[in-house]
Amino acid sequence: MSKPKFQTPTGMHDILPHNQAYYDKIYDAIKKVSSFYDFEKIDTPILEDFNLFTRSIGENTDIVEKEMFTLRTKGKDFLALRPEGTAPIMRSYIENGFVSLPQPVRLWYFGPFFRYEKPQSGRFRQFHQFGIEIIGEKDAIVDAQSILIMYSVLQELGLKNIIVKINSIGDDKCRPIYRKELVKYLREKKSSLCSDCQKRIKTNPLRVLDCKNDKCKEVLLGAPQSVDYLCDECKKHLKDVLEYLDELKIPYCLDSKLVRGLDYYTRTVFEIESTREESCGVALAGGGRYDNLAKALGGGEIDACGAAAGIERIIGEMKENKVKMPLGQVPEVFFTQIGPLAKKKSLSTLEELRKAGFQVGESFGKDGLKAQLGKASRLGVKAVLILGQKEALNDKILIRNMQTSKQVEVNQKDIVKELKQILKEK
Ligand code: HAM
């Protein structure tokens, strides 16, 4: 077969019917867990002012430099398809005066995001995330709670063998000291770094830490580590988060190279990964604390923490883990019709049954009884309704109990009552 003329854009996919149940299951899981913890749902627009992301994620990050889908509107606004949800939610918090609500404000979200990345396994240009944000709280307990919620949702979805990687990148007080030491070290090794990292020494030296290039990885073995430069407050904050995780028995490992690809983080950063060999190193979820984001967007001093998870990556893991999915709605009754008058009455009869709560199958395009019954038996329904020409004329209908093969004629007005009775019979 030749290629169809039109296909989905590179890195974007249809969510086909057979995959919809995964999205529904994930939606239900995050909704259930976040509602328990008193989160409220928020939706922000798919498009935002381009500068919202340069100010928050940072100009010298991969997302802003290489991965934004942008457009200029007819009114000359410069917009971007949202690559992530934290900056839009903080924009909304400031714009809607949520600061005057009791703090912290807890929000959750679910939806599509866009990054112009090189498509590969688990990396798409349109993907979906669910996320949580706890805005207006500086206590380390909410860092641990963000991790707990992400971890619990992944567990509820049947993912086994997952681990949290965690690090602290300090705050405005201690990070500059660490940054200086790191730059000093990287400058000495500059010639051994990849060309991207050579530039990053000046623009974003912390990003060198998670470069995947083998040469850079080797250089980084001896690099100074952020945890050794934390000020007393940041050290205590990290210690508190880890103690909560110990108490929760959530498996974690300290990862000194974890810095994350967004500039807005302070102190805690974390990712959750599967420990399956083939998926190692691919984050299912990521997040952290971002106490400076509100200020960067023109709000006040607002401490916050949160996380987001990649839905397509989770679905991949659910499939690998052979997570059982619920079957779709299976009809318990099948409706058949023979003759023009019966066919005319069939839509209204079916609608009556739907309103009464029955799950009913039909095959309206087929007029022969044999073909209709064939479909009924393939579905394994408990009862078949037969509306023939004679029954249609007399306001009657036949109900065949498929388990006992007994058939009764009932008045059409009694169909709901009679059908309920037959479905109860063994
Ligand atoms: P992020 O680490 O950039 O963080 O994305 C979160 C998750 O989205 C990743 O762990 C991954 O599972 C998924 N993801 C990211 N890019 C792609 C892609 N191209 N294709 C498929 N999945 C992808 C954030 O977005 C932050 N806003 C998280 C956060 C919330 N931090 C604080 N609050």
Image (cartoon, rainbow, N blue to C red):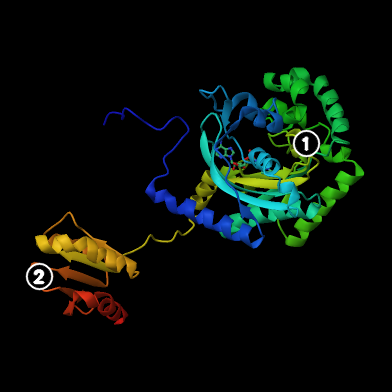
Residue 257 visible within the image: no
Q: Answer left or right for 140 relative to 42.
A: right
Q: Which mark is residue 197?
A: none
From the viewer's side, name the closer residue of 319 and 385.
Answer: 385
Q: Quadrant of residue 61?
A: top right
Q: Quadrant of ligand 1?
A: top right
**Total label count?**
2
From mark 2 to mark 1, how far is it between C-alphas? 75 Å
Element at label 1:
helix
Whether residue 37 is visible here, answered yes or no, is yes
Q: Amino acid at mark 2?
A: Leu
Residue type at the position of mark 1 = Lys
Check the picture and name the quadrant holding the C terminus.
Answer: bottom left
Instruction: Please identify the residue farthest to the right as the structure is shown.
Output: 232
User: Whole-percent x and y of residue 380?
Assistant: 27, 67
Residue at 21 percent across and 65 percent down: it is 335
**Within-10-Å neighbours for mark 1: few <14, some 14–19, many 20+:** some
Q: Nearer the viewer, mark 2 or mark 1?
A: 2
In terms of image quadrants, where is residue 372? Answer: bottom left
Residue 284 x, y percent position in the rendering:
60, 46
Q: Which quarter of the figure is the N terminus placed in?
A: top left
Question: Which residue is denoted by mark 2 in the rendering?
Answer: 393
**Residue that badge 1 annotates:** 295
Relative to 154, residue 389 above or below: below
Mark found first going from the N terminus, 2 or 1: 1
Front residue of 272/33: it is: 33
Quick one: SS at disc 2? helix
Q: Is residue 155 above or below residue 268?
A: below
The residue under the point 82% across, 36% down is 225
- Where is residue 337 shown, x and y percent of the image? 15, 64
Q: Is residue 235 above or below residue 219?
A: below
Q: Tell whether 422 sits left or right of 134.
A: left
